[in-house]
Image: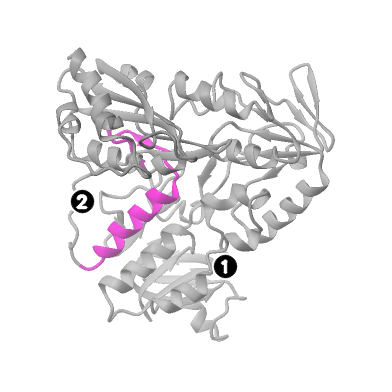
Amino acid sequence: MYDILVIGGGVSGFVAAVNAKRFYPAKKVALIERNPKKLIPCGIPYIFNTYEIDDDLMHLEKKLKKFGVELIKGSVEGVNINSKIVMLSKDADIDKTEQKKRLKYEKLIIATGSTPLIPPIEGIENAYFIKKEYDYLKKLVSKTKDAENITIIGGGFIGLEIADELSKNKNVTLIEAMDSLLPNSFDDDYSSEVKELLSKKVNIVLNSKVTKITDKHIYLDNVEIKSDLTIVATGFKPNTEMFKNILPLNEKGFIQADDYFRVDKDVYAVGDCVEHKEFFTSNPTPLMLASTAAFDARIAAANLYNLRIIRHNKDALNIYSTVIEGRMFAAVGITEKMAKKQGFEIIAAKTSTPSTHPPKFSHSTDVKLKLIFSKKDLYLLGAQISGGLNSAELINILSLAIQKNATATDLYTMQIGTHPILTPPPTFYPVSATAAEALKEF
């Protein structure tokens, strides 16, 4: 008998298990995972060049043990919600009696994650996917070393980051069906900057769909491109097949839960497998981010037995960051296009400033910031940044500003701390300066 069982050892499962033990130390907590060699998901693109695949391991068992959480190695074959029983596979690394393969629980947290979407392309079996599986990805890394011409299908964050990594020593083509890169995160001025940087080493093909894949070529309508290896990065779907007739799922297969990720009285779902709702509209959104998964897990774990943490920000805010050709790009909230589509009248303000003061330091670069406000009440709706690596945390400040309904006035009057080596100048700090540009238009 376990007090708290967690199914899945990815980011959401790990964070849920650790925080469940933290808030309820007297409870017996266990995490079930079929493959303990878990990878840090956002680090996967960098196993292709920057570091070895073993450098990306989460070291799940060691970390769980440190926090007093038991790891059960094995697969889950089924769940009986009414009887509060989880059925394990026969090869599960636990007492060999049949009775022990059926685990009783008080509280269950489902963190089964996601699996790659497989697009309906002829010859798709000739391609590789970004599966979050150690052995599969180790084989893929080995394949990339032997390939000279590599094609990436998908111009999202993962596709771009893998293309950027592989282009350091391979001929890389990136194919995107839309007419710009990262269109759901950035407006054209920022996505074009991403394209300009990436195209220095990567052949980028936009507005094109792959019709066929072979072991040596890919085909785009009537165009043939040589490709020794094709990697598909066109998104993920929730890994919820097991719960199809057990739990409420939406049309995309995400588990439906309340604001505290409770599906049933004693069942919770967190991470990529659970439905999220967009911050401004409360419409379902397929948001699959490690940072969001960790947030879900913290909320669910803290409130398993009683309401300890009140959640004021009820819906999910999309917060992204990446590095392309050594330059940081980050975004939060909605773009200008999205804001207008949702019916907002907006003020969009932009500034550019050095990342240090004076800009003579070797690591200094320009920081470009765009803030999007509602014209009616000056609430912050979105932000987009490009700049040096030391500017990345700025997006989290702006995320908090959106969650707290901050206005352009709030950002203009925000008190800050600066340092010549670490930050832009106090005389032209990006947030206050950009807010000033917006207030000028109000």
Q: Quadrant of the N terminus?
A: bottom left
Q: Residue at x 41, y 33 (%)?
A: 359
Mark 1 or mark 2, which has the lower sequence index?
A: 1
Which SS class for mark 2? loop
Q: Amino acid at mark 2?
A: Arg
In the image, which disc is placed on residue 244?
none
Q: Position of residue 137 (x, y in %)?
A: 67, 54
Task: Give the vertical position of 115 relative to 309 (above or below).
Answer: above
Q: Which residues are magenta?
A: 276-305
Viewer-closest of 198 and 430: 430
- Note whether residue 343 is visible: no
Q: Residue at x 33, y 21 (%)?
A: 350
- Find residue 246 and report its image quarter: bottom left
- Find residue 283 and report its image quarter: top left
* Mark 2, other Cα within 10 Å: few <14 / some 14–19 / many ≥20: few
Q: Nearer the viewer, mark 1 or mark 2?
A: 2
Which SS class for mark 1? loop
Q: Is residue 331 left or right of residue 307?
A: right
* Residue bearing the label numbered 2: 311
Q: Amino acid at mark 1?
A: Arg
Q: Is residue 421 left or right of residue 49?
A: left
Q: Is residue 187 left or right of residue 211?
A: left
Q: Position of residue 48 (x, y in %)?
A: 67, 49
Mark-to-mark CA distance, 1 and 2: 32 Å
* Residue bearing the label numbered 1: 34
Viewer-closest of 395 and 233: 395
